[in-house]
Structure formats: C-alpha cells, structure tokens
Image (tube, rainbow, N blue to C red):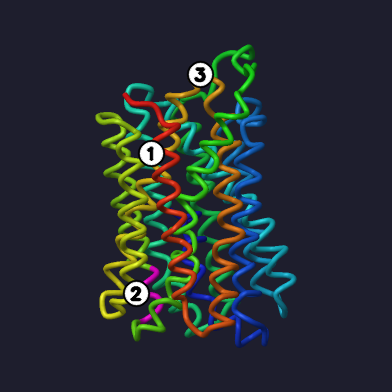
C-alpha cells in the first residue's frame, strides 16, 4: 500500500509545474522516470530474490524509500526530485513490489492468481488513500511535507513487513539449484511484451494525468486520482480471483476493449469523467493482476519470474512514454483528446495480441 502511492503522483502535477516554472510534460517525466527505474528493478530482481532473506529485502526497501523521498522533499528544482523520487524511490518501489508479487505466489502455490491479485490490489489501495493525504500535505506544508511523510511511512511499513516475513518462516526458494533458468523463447516474450505494454499504456497515461484530466472537466484532482485507484483495486482483486477459474485469454482480451471504450467515451462525455476514469482503472488493475498469472502458466518454475521481469519492461516503457506524451499533447493543445484516442488504439492492439499469445486454460 505504501509503495502504491507512486500512482497518486498526478496530484503533484500542477503544484510542481508552478513551483519549478516548467511545463507539464517536464513534470510528468518525474513520474515516468520513476516507473522506468521501478521496471529495471523488477527486471533484475530475480537475480537477488533467492540470494537474500525476505526480511533483508524489505529492510533495503525501507532505507532506499526513506532516502529517496527525503531527498525529493528538500529539492529546489526538478533535478533533485528526479534523483530522489524517480531514481532512488523508484528502485525501492520496484524491489518491494516485484519481490512481494513473486513471494506471495510462492507462499500460496494453490492460489497463486488470487495471491498476486491481492498484492496488486494492495498496491492500488495505496493509490486510493494517498491522494487525499498528499492533498492535505500540499495544503499545510507543500511538497516538502508530502515527501517527508511519504518517506517516513514507507520506512515504518517496510520495517514492519520485514518483521512479518521473518516471523512467518516462509522462504522464497529452498534450493540453490532452483536459480537455473532455461532458455526463454525470444519471439514469444516479444509478442507478450507488446500485448502487455499496449494494454497498460492506457492505464498509466490515465493514472499519471488523472488529476489533470479531471480538472479540465471541472472535478477535483485528488478525487479523480482516488477514484481511478479504487477501481484499479477492484479490478486487481476480481481478475486475480477469476484468473484461477477462467481462461487468462478471455480476461486479457476483454479488459483492454473495456478500457478503450471508456477512453473514447471520455472525449465526448466530460460530465462522466470520474466514472469513466474508474472504468479505465478497473481494466488496468485487472490487466496487471492477470498477466503475472498467465506468464507463470506459460513459463513454469524458475522461468516464470525471469520471464515476467522481461515482459515487465513493457510496463516501464509504457510508463515512460505514455504519461510524458499525454503531458506533451496537453502542452500543445490545452486538452487530452488526442492522447485519449491514442491510448484507446493501444488498448485495441493489446486485445488482438493477447488473443494470439495467451494460452487457453
């Protein structure tokens, strides 16, 4: 939950735009770069998951998260925010989220889909709770108070997580031999990469600019950020539960179409902005909860985390390009219409690709 607050960053767009005297596209890069470093950490994470105790990993998350948010809190320009929030906090975020996702599945082998869904739902819950807290912090202490509070919460919660996993006695892996990974088919990984990346791009664009999209329609920014995150949570839980029961292909074909329809509706129904953003969040939450289970089904055993790490780079690419592009389009046109069209097209592409590469079960 604490790490999921990264998806409430849209609350900071307008305040930082004014504070740093820069464009929305430039401020959007803080969020985008954070997702890039988060992704890189998930990619390389499997090389350390089995080499460290679970508690040790969460201790690293605690210190890196606190240092990164702390550095951002004292920044007088966006460069230090990039270093503290995007780089250091992004690494802490990827380490905590990536390990938590795989660890939950291994601790619950008979309900791996649901376990992964709970992790992604918890991540989404953080994005539900954070916008209001960030809005209060901005009101009473500005960006400094928001980042200082974030760093403190991440530190305390991560130390608590370290204690919990240490007391549970659950291990990530029992054998050194399990670290060996067989050859992963490049062509199949590439096709899943496109399906996943195009599927999450719409959600990441909407999440990264939820407050801005809502503001253009006359709604409070923090309410929009919380709404999209709340529906994200529901989508993660429901799809995680369903992924243990019905075809992954059916879920991953249907969700992007639903998201694309909502994005197109946003361009003509501004009075329904909050509910439509919620639908986009629901589709995004279901997508990120189902793909790990689908990949684990395609690549059993130790191949699964490594395959997921490679496919997850698509999330980072989408996170870098989609929010920045949406910000750039807003700077050019003063609205998000073209960005919403582009995101809807990517959703349709995701559905087509998922139909080709995801196994029936």
Quarter of the C terminus within the rendering: top left
**Label 1 environment density (alpha carbons within 10 Å; few <14, some 14–19, many ≥20):** many
From the image, state whether disc 2 or disc 1 is nearer to you. Answer: 1
14 on left or right of 279: right
Q: Secondary structure at mark 3?
A: loop
Mark 1, residue position: 290
State whether residue 195 is above or below residue 37: above
Number of residue marks: 3
Q: Position of residue 354 (x, y in %)?
A: 42, 38
Residue of label 2: 223
Residue 292 drawn in magenta: no
Q: Is residue 76 above or below residue 156?
A: below
* Residue under the point 26% across and 75% down: 272
- Report the magenta residues as a range: 220-225
User: Could you tell me which secondary element the residue under label 2 belongs to?
Assistant: helix
Tell me the chief SS of the magenta region. helix
Q: Earlier in the sequence, mark 3 or mark 1?
A: 1
Lower sequence index among marks 2 and 1: 2
- Work out whether residue 96 or residue 44 is closer to the camera in this orientation and state it: 44
Calculate the distance from the C-alpha at mark 2 to the C-alpha at mark 1: 27 Å
| Pointer 3 residue | 301
Q: Residues within 10 Å of mark 2 (few under 14, many from 20)?
A: some
Front-most of 59 and 274?
A: 274
Q: Quadrant of residue 267?
A: bottom left
């Amino acid at each position: 939950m604490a790490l999921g607050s990264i998806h409430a960053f849209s609350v900071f767009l307008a305040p930082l735009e004014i504070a740093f005297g820069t464009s929305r596209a430039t401020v959007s890069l803080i969020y985008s770069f954070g997702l890039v470093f988060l992704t890189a950490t998930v990619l390389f994470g499997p090389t350390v998951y089995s080499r460290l105790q679970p508690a040790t990993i969460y201790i690293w998350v605690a210190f890196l998260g606190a240092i990164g948010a702390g550095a951002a809190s004292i920044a007088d320009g966006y460069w230090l925010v990039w270093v503290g929030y995007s780089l250091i906090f992004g690494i802490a975020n990827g380490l905590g989220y990536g390990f938590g996702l795989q660890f939950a599945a291994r601790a619950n082998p008979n309900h791996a889909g649901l376990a992964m869904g709970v992790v992604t739902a918890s991540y989404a819950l953080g994005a539900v709770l954070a916008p209001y807290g960030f809005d209060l912090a901005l009101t009473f202490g500005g960006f400094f108070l928001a980042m200082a509070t974030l760093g403190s919460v991440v530190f305390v919660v991560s130390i608590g997580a370290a204690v919990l996993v240490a007391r549970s006695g659950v291990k990530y892996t029992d054998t050194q031999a399990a670290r060996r990974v067989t050859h992963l088919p490049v062509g199949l990984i590439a096709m899943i990469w496109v399906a996943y990346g195009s599927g999450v791009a719409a959600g990441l664009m909407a999440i990264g600019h939820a407050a801005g999209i809502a503001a253009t329609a006359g709604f409070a920014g923090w309410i929009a950020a919380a709404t999209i995150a709340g529906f994200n949570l529901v989508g993660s839980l429901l799809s995680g539960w369903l992924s243990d029961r019905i075809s992954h292909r059916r879920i991953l074909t249907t969700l992007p179409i639903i998201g694309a329809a909502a994005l197109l509706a946003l361009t003509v129904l501004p009075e329904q902005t909050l509910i439509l953003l919620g639908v986009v969040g629901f589709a995004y939450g279901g997508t990120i909860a189902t793909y790990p289970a689908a990949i684990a089904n395609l690549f059993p055993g130790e191949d699964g985390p490594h395959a997921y790490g490679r496919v997850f780079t698509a999330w980072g690419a989408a996170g870098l390009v989609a929010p920045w592009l949406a910000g750039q389009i807003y700077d050019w046109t003063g609205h998000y219409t073209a960005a919403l069209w582009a995101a809807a097209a990517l959703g349709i592409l995701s559905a087509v690709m998922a139909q080709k590469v995801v196994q029936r079960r």
